[in-house]
Amino acid sequence: MKNLKHILIIAALVLGGFSAYAQAPQHFDEDIWTLRNTAIPGFHCIADDIVQYSPAALMLGLKACGYEGRTGWGQMLTADAFTVGVQALVTRVIKISVGRTRPNGGHHSFPSGHTATAFMCATMLHKEYGWRSPWWSIGGYTVAAFTGVSRILNNRHWMSDVAAG
């Protein structure tokens, strides 16, 4: 029953992502893009490429240092490996199926894979250590949100790509 609940949640999120893409007024994405290009036209940083993984790295570091988590190494790694596989597959299939062009002219914009990865890592951290303190979860999701904003600032994604990711 618990697995069915997770499958239904994933399906709802994927359908919600498609809905966000279909319903997003194009002028909203373009307004954000214009604002970005007016305010910081030459902006580029590589932080989003790195920090997307930091919640997972923190989780592994805490576990390696002996900080008690919700599960043992085996169960945590098995669940997280499955999660990574599903997220990568779903994100890639949607990217290829939709074929949206990036604001900088690249391919496969929708949804943002960096944002999806960052929120997946934040959720893994939350599941393993959120019960110990809400600050682990808050920190992880803050990093994930930063990743999404960075994708827009780096001119790699539209706002709706990040929202779906």
Image (cartoon, helix red, strand yellow):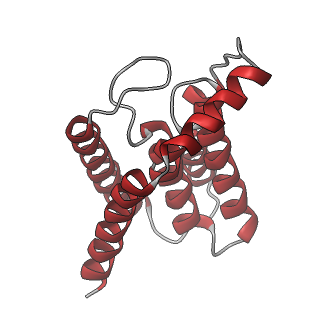
Q: Residue at x 33, y 60 (%)?
A: 14
The x, y position of residue 63, in whole percent, is 57, 54
Relative to the observer, which residue lies in front, 61 or 139?
139
Q: How many marks?
A: 0
Please say if 100 is above or below 7: above
Q: Is residue 77 visible?
A: no
Q: In this image, 104 relative to 94: left or right?
A: right
Extreme bottom residue here? 1
Q: Is residue 106 visible?
A: yes
Q: Residue at x 26, y 40 (%)?
A: 98
Picture quadrant where residue 36 is located: top right
Please say if 105 is above or below 116: above
Q: In this image, 31 relative to 74: left or right?
A: right
Extreme top residue here? 42
Q: Residue at x 54, y 65 (%)?
A: 128
Please say if 47 is above or below 110: above
Question: Where's the N terminus, which quadrant?
Answer: bottom left
The x, y position of residue 16, in whole percent, is 38, 64
The x, y position of residue 146, in whole percent, is 68, 42
Q: Residue at x 48, y 37 (%)?
A: 114
Q: In this image, 81 relative to 49: left or right?
A: left
Extreme right residue here? 39
Picture quadrant where residue 13 is located: bottom left
The x, y position of residue 65, in whole percent, is 63, 50
